[in-house]
Structures are given as C-alpha cells and as structure tokens.
Image (tube, rainbow, N blue to C red):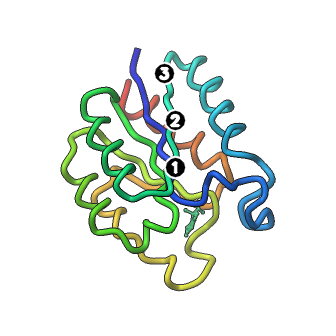
C-alpha cells in the first residue's frame, strides 16, 4: 500500500483557534482524521507530523525517503523564508506537493514568494483544509496510478 507523509509546519498546531477567518475552524487533528479516512478509501496509508522547529521538519523530510512514497507539505511561514527546507526537499527523491490552506496570492506580498515551490512537484493553495485533500487526489491519480 503506498504511504504518504502529511507534514505540517509552524503554528498549524493552533488551527481551530488561530485566525479562524483565514484558516477556518477545523483543528489539525480533524484535518489529519479526514485525510486518514479519505486515503483509506483510496488504498493509501497516511502518517502525519507537525513541528514548529525547522530542523525537525528537515529530519522528517529526510526520513520520508525511507518510509514514504510521497509528502504533502504545508511549510507554513517557512515557505517564504527557509533555504534549508528547500534544500531538504531538493535532496530527496520522494515527490513533495506544497499545500496552503489560504490563497497566499490574495494575501500580503511577502506570502507570494515561496522558496519551496520550484523544487516541489506542484502546489495547491486557497481551498481551505481541502487543499490537503486535493493533494491526496493528485498523488492517487497522478503519482500512484
Ligand atoms: C499557510 C500560509 C502561510 O503564508 C502562513 O505563514 C501559514 C499558513 C497556509 O496554509 O495558508 O502559516 O501556509
């Protein structure tokens, strides 16, 4: 069974209480649960990890090389700043899809730049928590078919 690591970056542990007008009322646990259920119907296994630490996210990407067939990654604020996370994505063979809950292009200009997009397989932004679900479909239909 193919397996996907869902990787959540800084402050996403606060979903549900954090800026609900931007990110919605859903919690991170609920997102992970929705993904586990949708993936089970597709015959895909999900593991999820969140960290507020850049190094822990880098370690998780390195480990994905051994234990995942794809990564759905919301790098959150690090999207716009982290050369080290970009290098980690570039260093692994496993395909990575970048996701954002909000439409980063409809927000402040500093969010328009992603250091990670050029090394990701693709990017989904602006569909609320369902951005993750759309990334899951992309793996099912495009990568695992
Ligand atoms: C985000 C967008 C980022 O700009 C922001 O820093 C986040 C969340 C999103 O999912 O919409 O923390 O990645």
Could you say where residue 86 lies in the image, as x and y percent from the top left? 29, 61
From mark 2 to mark 1, how far is it between C-alphas? Answer: 8 Å
Label ID, residue 102: none
Residue at figure coordinates x 53%, y 59% from the top left: 10
Location of residue 85 by image quarter: bottom left
- Which quarter holds ligand 1? bottom right
Label ID, residue 45: 3
Residue at figure coordinates x 27%, y 63% from the top left: 84
Q: Is residue 11 above or below residue 133?
A: below
Side of 62 where 25 appears, left or right: right
State whether label 3 is within 8 Å of ligand 1. Answer: no
- Callout 2–callout 1 Cβ contact below 8 Å: yes
From mark 1 to mark 3, how far is it between C-alphas? Answer: 17 Å
Label ID, residue 48: 2
Residue at figure coordinates x 50%, y 68% from the top left: 77
Residue at figure coordinates x 28%, y 52% from the top left: 89
Could you say where residue 24 lies in the image, as x and y percent from the top left? 77, 57
From mark 3 to mark 2, how far is it between C-alphas? Answer: 10 Å
Q: Is residue 59 above or below residue 116?
A: above
């Amino acid at each position: 069974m193919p397996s996907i690591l869902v990787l959540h970056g800084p402050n996403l542990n606060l979903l549900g209480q954090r800026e609900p007008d931007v990110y919605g009322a859903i919690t991170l646990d609920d997102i992970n649960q929705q993904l586990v259920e949708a993936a089970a119907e597709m015959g895909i296994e999900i593991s999820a990890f969140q960290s507020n630490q850049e190094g822990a996210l880098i370690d998780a990407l390195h480990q994905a090389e051994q234990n995942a067939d794809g990564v759905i990654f919301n790098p959150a604020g690090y999207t716009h700043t982290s050369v080290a996370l970009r290098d980690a994505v570039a260093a692994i063979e496993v395909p990575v899809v970048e996701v954002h809950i909000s439409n980063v292009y409809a927000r402040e200009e500093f969010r328009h730049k992603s250091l990670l997009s050029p090394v990701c397989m693709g990017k989904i932004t602006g569909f609320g928590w369902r951005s993750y679900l759309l990334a899951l479909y992309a793996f099912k239909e495009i990568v695992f078919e």
